[in-house]
Amino acid sequence: MAKFTYKMQNILDIKYKLETQAKTAFSIAAANLNKEEEKLEALRQRRIAYEIRARELMEDRLDFHEIRVTRTAIETMKGAIRNQTLVVHVAQRNLESARKHLQEVMTERKTHEILKEKAFEEFKKELEKEESKAVDELVSFTHNHAIEG
């Protein structure tokens, strides 16, 4: 019996490898986004802590130096939060880009798998035709020899 070999198997193998790489890139981008979002949340929590401290300083005996330092810290945190928000947006865009690339690679791989399945179906049909032809020839041969005999 003939063995099925897909002529473009090497391309399909490359598509599998590209998909694996795209999945890895996507997971790295997702992990990076999570890390940057955690940094942003930590900065927000620090700003809140400074704001609480500033309120406490206004209620107690006024220490203008400490109040000024705390307000400077709050403004610094606001700037850091703006910067980190930009970093988070970049990480989100990178994640979206990685997701789109992964989708494209998966589509290409699926296309090649479909081509392989169709090639296999054609191979099976051709094999069935050959078997049917061989059976017809055998029946014809047997029938002709039975008539002669």
Image: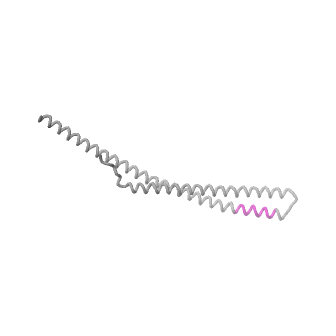
Q: Position of residue 42 (x, y in %)?
A: 69, 56
What residue is rendered at 35% in x and 48% in y? 118
Query: Which quadrant of the structure image shows residue 128?
Result: top left
What residue is rendered at 25% in x and 44% in y? 130
Tell which of 120 and 149 is nearer to you. 149
Coloring basis for residues:
one colour
Q: Position of residue 81 (x, y in %)?
A: 68, 60
| Quarter of the image where the C terminus is located | top left
Query: 100 left or right of 117?
Result: right
Q: Is residue 132 above or below residue 37?
A: above
Query: 138 left or right of 46?
Result: left
What residue is rendered at 13% in x and 34% in y? 147
| Residue sitting at the far front | 149
Residue 6 colored in magenta in the image: no
Tell which of 139 and 107 is nearer to you. 139
Tell which of 2 and 72 is nearer to you. 2
Query: 139 left or right of 69?
Result: left
Tell which of 28 and 74 is nearer to you. 28
| Residue sitting at the far left | 148
Chief secondary structure of the magenta portion: helix
Query: Which quadrant of the structure image shows residue 52?
Result: bottom right
State the extent of the magenta-drawn residues as a range. 67-79
Q: How many marks?
A: 0
Query: Which quadrant of the structure image shows residue 125?
Result: top left
What residue is rendered at 78% in x and 62% in y? 71
Q: Position of residue 113 (x, y in %)?
A: 40, 50
Residue 74 colored in magenta in the image: yes
